[in-house]
Image (spheres, rainbow, N blue to C red):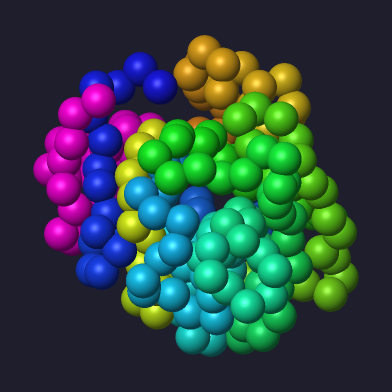
Amino acid sequence: MSNPTYLHFDGLQSYIEMPDSSDFSLPTTGALTVSAWMRPEVLTFSNTENGYVHWMGKGEKGQQEWVFRIYSDDNTVGRANRISFYLFNLNGGEGIGSHFQDPNNPVQAGVWIHVVGAADAQRTYLYINGTKIDSDVYAPSIQPQHGTAPLRIGTRDFNSYFQGDIREVRVWNRKLDDSEIATLFSSDSTPPNGLVAEYLLLQDVAPDTAGDHTGVIHAGTWLSV
């Protein structure tokens, strides 16, 4: 991470919203990669749904597409601080995706994590700190479609909110390969091919430095490294 600032989300009402675009949808090209640095401030979140918070995603009721979630430490299904990337059918219901949960290397409050979720025409993928952790088959049970929901950071649909810090969110309309993701983590070298949006989160708006999908920040707080 080379940037000197980051955006803090209060876990109550902070989020960023980008208008709906097919550039953020898996059906556009049949592949998608989303990358972000995130740092939970706490391990037990106060504003959860079903024991987890959606910290970034594109989806609302009847318009579900994809999401990142992190489980609260006090969830009741044994998934303490599990990080997941899920795909959904447009009408919602159960999703299919990939996850990270390692009792020998647990998520820590106050520690930055580089998270990449990706999908191609058959599988989802999750990378943590440049390493592929999990891959799962979603097709044909899940058949992604382009919905009308905006892309949001810090929440997905206002039913839960992330408490912590997020920066350097990027979206590609292709599946980055393992070496590209490892290099992105280790040197912040951003593959330009297929990059449709990039939110470095350096100032009081969320400009898209790769495209034309500028976002609006709601109630975030700017902090320095």
Q: Position of residue 216 (x, y in %)?
A: 21, 55
Q: Which of 68 and 150 is in front in this view?
A: 68
Point out the image quarter for the C terminus: top left
Range covered by the magenta-colored residues: 197-225
Which residue lies at the image location 25% right of the left edge and 69% below the top edge? 12
| Picture residue at 30% right of the left edge, 63% below the top | 11
Question: In the rendered view, does 56 fall on the left or right side of 86?
Answer: left
Instruction: Tell me the quarter of the picture where residue 175 sits.
Output: top right
**Main secondary structure found in the magenta portion:** loop
* x and y percentages locating residue 195 in the rendered image: 50, 34
Does residue 90 lie above or below 102 as drawn?
Answer: below
* Residue 212 visible in the shown view: no
Residue 151 appears at what percent x and percent y? 41, 60
Relative to residue 203, is residue 4 depicted above or below? above
Q: How many marks?
A: 0
User: Image quadrant for the N terminus?
Assistant: top left
Q: Which residue is drawn at 34% across and 57% down?
A: 163
Residue 201 within the magenta-colored segment of the rendering: yes
Relative to 47, say whether 73 is above or below: above
Residue ID at (71%, 80%): 94
Instruction: Note whether residue 96 is visible.
Output: yes
- 197, above or below 139, in the image: above
Is residue 215 within the magenta segment? yes
